Amino acid sequence: MKKHIYCIIYSFIENENSANEIQSKKTFENLASLDNNIKGIFLGNKGSKRNPFWKIRKENNKYFIDRFDFVNPYIEKLFKLGIIRKNIFPYLFAKRCQSIIRKDHFSKIIYIRIASPEEGICYIKNLKRLNIARIFFEMHNINYEISAFYRWSFENTYCKLAYKYFFELARKNSDRVRIISLTRQLADIITSRLNIEKINIVPSGHDFHISQPKAVNFNKEKIEVIYVGFSFRYRDVEILIQALNYLSDKFYLRMVGGGTSERENLRKKYHSLINQKKLLLGEPVAHFKIREKLFNADIAVISLPSTGFGYFTSPLKLFEYMSVGLPIIASDTPCLREVLTKDSALFFKPGDNQDLANKIEYMARNEEEAKRISERAFRDSKKYTYFERAKKIYQLISRE
């Protein structure tokens, strides 16, 4: 009997305001292109005060569970509690998702980009009742490893216990439960700390379909170094800015994105560099306009710390830089080394702004090497489209 496949993601895919939303949307669209019977369940943003919590609506092959977040911002602001958004809401989302799939009496394969351990626990404890033949949890992080998620120690303690219980349930139900990781580094953390084996790796991707890499030309009066990102938090972006102090006036840094408060804080702190026009802070732009920004730049930089979030992430900007054919300078971290090599990027010591400045200068002085790096990155980017990502996921969920 044919099994019904569901793709469930706690994300507002009707928006493109975060890397999470873009990746979730593109992954589902490409999965659906491989199998038009796949159904998706996502967060929706059309809730109201009349229907504030978890109203369900259906559009073609997608269900949306609308959420009107009318209380949580005040609770977070007053009590500094991250556990509501990061743990409780994903659990409530899972409960509403189950009210949808429970009505489908066919055997099911579930693919979930998991947002919290409670979400996973909710499904594993109901495998039989929901008639789930196999369930795949794609993990992008472990919440307690990201310091910005929780303020209070009890939140971290609770979260660690929740993950421990989730993985215990996953092991006990290993005949039906599978784990997918965004990076090898995250998979290693899960394996070493939580004793889970058979983890499949499916990296992030891009949808910039470009036939030729951009031309590399440093024979100009000014050289633009670019960094793009929906958020600047825990990405070591100030290392980029501080590197400007070691660079001549020929170089300037354009930063596109970040939150309003993040940009305002940087303006206050680095107003001198802004007045010198060495630092340009641009507001976020629609995702489809990012490609134009990248084509107009000369060198792209990815900065990540060597610990915490920076140790196991897989940033979208990495694949978008590669797809355009920009010469890339990246923090020498294990997660970036999973995708980049010495032939497709220059690496600098994480947290070392002077070393970053040296690498920028070296790249600008060695145009032929920069061309080789950009061409290799461009070729390698073809392995990391969202369609290739969807194919890997579909092969995993449909082969067993």
Image (spheres, grey):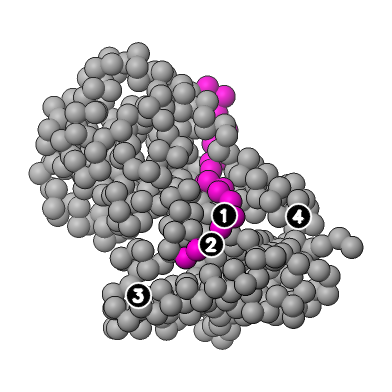
Q: Please provide percent x and percent y for residue 237.
A: 26, 47
Q: Please provide percent x and percent y for residue 354.
A: 15, 35
**Label 2 vs label 3, nearer the camera:** 2
Q: Please provide percent x and percent y for residue 281.
A: 26, 45
Distance in Å between CA atoms under marks 1 and 4: 15 Å
Of the pair 389 and 195, the residue shown nearer to us? 195
| Secondary structure category for the residue under label 2 | loop
Query: Within the image, what quadrant is residue 170 found in?
Result: bottom right
Q: Name above or below for residue 245 compared with residue 106.
A: above
State which tag comes first along the sequence, 4 or 3. 3
Q: Read off the residue under disc 4.
A: 400
Q: Read off the residue under disc 2.
A: 196
Q: Read off the residue under disc 1.
A: 199
| Secondary structure category for the residue under label 1 | strand
State which tag comes first along the sequence, 3 or 1. 3
Residue 307 falls inside the magenta stretch = no
Q: Identity of the amino acid at label 1?
A: Ile
**Label 4 vs label 3, nearer the camera:** 4
Q: Is residue 270 left or right of residue 24?
A: left
State which tag comes first along the sequence, 2 or 4. 2
Q: Identity of the amino acid at label 4?
A: Glu
Q: Read off the residue under disc 3.
A: 156
Q: In terms of secondary structure, what is the magenta stretch mainly? A: loop
> Residue at image x 41%, y 45%?
335
> Residue at image x 45%, y 40%?
338
Q: Identity of the amino acid at label 2?
A: Ile
State which tag comes first along the sequence, 1 or 4. 1
| Secondary structure category for the residue under label 4 | loop
